[in-house]
Image (tube, rainbow, N blue to C red):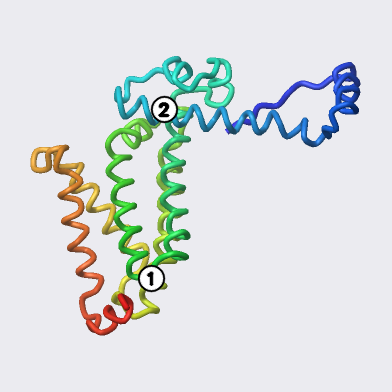
Amino acid sequence: MAAITGASGHAATAQDGATNAGSGDTPSRRRRAPRSDGRRSVEKILAATEKLLARDGLSVSLEEVAREAGVASTTLYRHFPSRMHLLEALHRGHVTRVADEANRLQASEPPFTALTMWLEEFVTLGLELQGGLALLLSEGLKESDPVSNARWGRTLLTEAARTLLDNAQQAGVVRRDIGAPELVFLLGGIVRAVVGSPASTPENRRATTAQLLLDVVIDGLVAGVHPSDRARERR
């Protein structure tokens, strides 16, 4: 997204230099400040959007977001020229957080635990996105490219899955005849099955149903693995 940049002029630069001499500040620090302020504004805008979407649904306006974030409307529009740009940024933020979680789990958990915890994160993300953001992005408004968004997200999540799956396979705790693309395809199938059939899966039961289906997938991943291999990991 576009960063806020400040205008500069000779008079202003001279005045800033005089101020700098007394404060010990540096030009590089002055230049970083607008970017830092811009990042903070973006973070506040995205957090406000999350809150309002959860509370009021998809009818939230950009003006409401600006008020909730405590920023001027002009600041919001400078970063997000349209509602679609804002929702796209939110979508990409969700996907990136789940992908990054793979690295954290890899460093902190045994291979099987890291993989299964991340699979749960993936399915949770899918339910959230299918519940609203993906619907808007799929409308194909001119400000957004839903095909590119989907391709980007699938690639990022497949690579995250590959890291955890490879580790678990090398540890001998899951079957070796499945790859990351197939695993991501299965997880996407869970989300589509749960969200795409509201008559059989009421909204208040979607998470429970998704967890049940994920448990079946996990049982399939460990099929054929000797119990002693799993026991070694738990120790």
Q: Position of residue 184 (x, y in %)?
A: 33, 58
Q: In screen coordinates, is 172 left or right of 220?
A: right
Disc marking residue 120:
none
Tell me, for residue 49, which label it has, or none: 2
Q: Is residue 176 visible?
A: no
Q: Which mark is residue 110?
A: 1
Q: Whole-percent x and y of residue 64?
A: 42, 16
Cα separation, mark 2 vs mark 1, equals 35 Å
Tell me what residue is drawn at x 36 percent, y 73 percent.
Answer: 168
- Badge 2: residue crowd in 10 Å (few <14, some 14–19, many ≥20): many
Mark 2–mark 1 contact, CB under 8 Å? Answer: no
Q: Nearer the viewer, residue 32 or 160?
A: 32
Secondary element type, mark 1:
loop
What is the quadrant of the C terminus in the image? Answer: bottom left
Place of residue 81 in the rendered image (x, y in percent of width and height, measured from the top left) = 53, 22
- Which kind of residue does numbered mark 1 sit on? Pro
Q: Residue at x 36, y 24 (%)?
A: 52
Q: Quadrant of residue 165?
A: bottom left
In the rendered structure, which disc, 2 or 1, sits on the residue that comes first in sequence?
2
Is 94 placed above or below 234 here? above
Secondary structure state at the residue bearing disc 2: helix
Mark 1, residues whose alpha carbon is within 10 Å: few (<14), some, or many (≥20)? some
Inspect the image, locate mark 2, and give the three-letter code of the amino acid beneath it.
Thr
Quadrant containing the N terminus in the rendered view: top right
